[in-house]
């Protein structure tokens, strides 16, 4: 799944680079997606079949990209609404904050004290921090998804 997403992003970047390099035959900035088609394309000089073929291909790519862009905007807007964690004054989300802070303290103590944690008083504080964090996480999960 991860590799598939990476390949898709690589393809997307290549497509945007290709579109940025090509000369646009139709000004699509003034029109919404799909309104201007190749049939409405005004020509000042005779156009070869190859140019028409390339223009149709670019038009399809641009239309596909614009549709994809609108879908992404909708997804990002919906995820932005669902992502709200709240603040520490919220009684449910307070447990999430307690979990994050206590595990952060425990991890920081692990990095600072290293192997001395098991044999010192810091080890007791470390154990309490992770225990309180685990309990807070369980309480938050129960309250949030009940």
Image (cartoon, grey):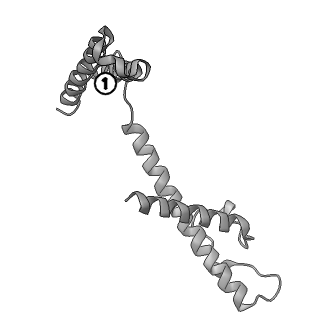
- Quadrant placement of the C terminus: top left
Locate residue 4 relative to residue 141 in the image: left or right.
right
- Quadrant placement of the N terminus: bottom left
Asked whether 120 or 17 is in front, the reply is 120
| Residue 37 visible in this rendered orientation of the protein | no
Q: Residue at x 65, y 85 (%)?
A: 53
Asked whether 49 or 142 is in front, the reply is 142
Please tell me in which quadrant of the rendered image residue 27 appears: bottom right
Instruction: Where is residue 12? Give x, y as percent.
Output: 55, 63
Which residue position holds label 1?
A: 96
Instruction: Where is residue 43? Give x, y as percent.
Output: 77, 82
Instruction: Where is residue 140? Give x, y as percent.
Output: 24, 26
Mark 1, secondary structure of its residue:
helix
- Packing grade of label 1 (10 A; few <14, some 14-19, many >=20) is many
The single residue placed furthest to the right in the displayed view is 45
In the image, residue 111 sits, relative to residue 63, either above or below, namely above
Q: Residue at x 44, y 19 (%)?
A: 112
The single residue placed furthest to the top in the displayed view is 121
Q: Residue at x 70, y 88 (%)?
A: 50
Please tell me in which quadrant of the rendered image residue 84 appears: top left
Asked whether 51 or 27 is in front, the reply is 51
Locate residue 131 relative to residue 111 in the image: left or right.
left
In the image, residue 83 sits, relative to residue 74, either above or below, namely above
């Amino acid at each position: 799944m991860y590799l598939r997403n990476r390949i898709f992003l690589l393809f997307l970047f290549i497509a945007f680079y290709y579109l940025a390099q090509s000369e646009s035959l139709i000004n699509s900035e003034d029109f919404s997606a799909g309104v201007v088609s190749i049939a409405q394309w005004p020509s000042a000089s005779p156009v070869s079949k190859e140019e028409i073929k390339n223009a149709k291909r670019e038009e399809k790519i641009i239309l596909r990209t614009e549709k994809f862009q609108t879908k992404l905007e909708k997804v990002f807007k919906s995820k932005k609404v669902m992502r709200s964690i709240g603040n520490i004054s919220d009684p449910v989300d307070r447990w999430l904050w307690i979990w994050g802070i206590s595990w952060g303290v425990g991890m920081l103590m692990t990095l600072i004290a290293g192997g001395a944690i098991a044999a010192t008083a810091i080890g007791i504080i470390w154990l309490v921090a992770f225990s309180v964090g685990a309990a807070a996480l369980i309480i938050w999960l129960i309250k949030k998804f009940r």
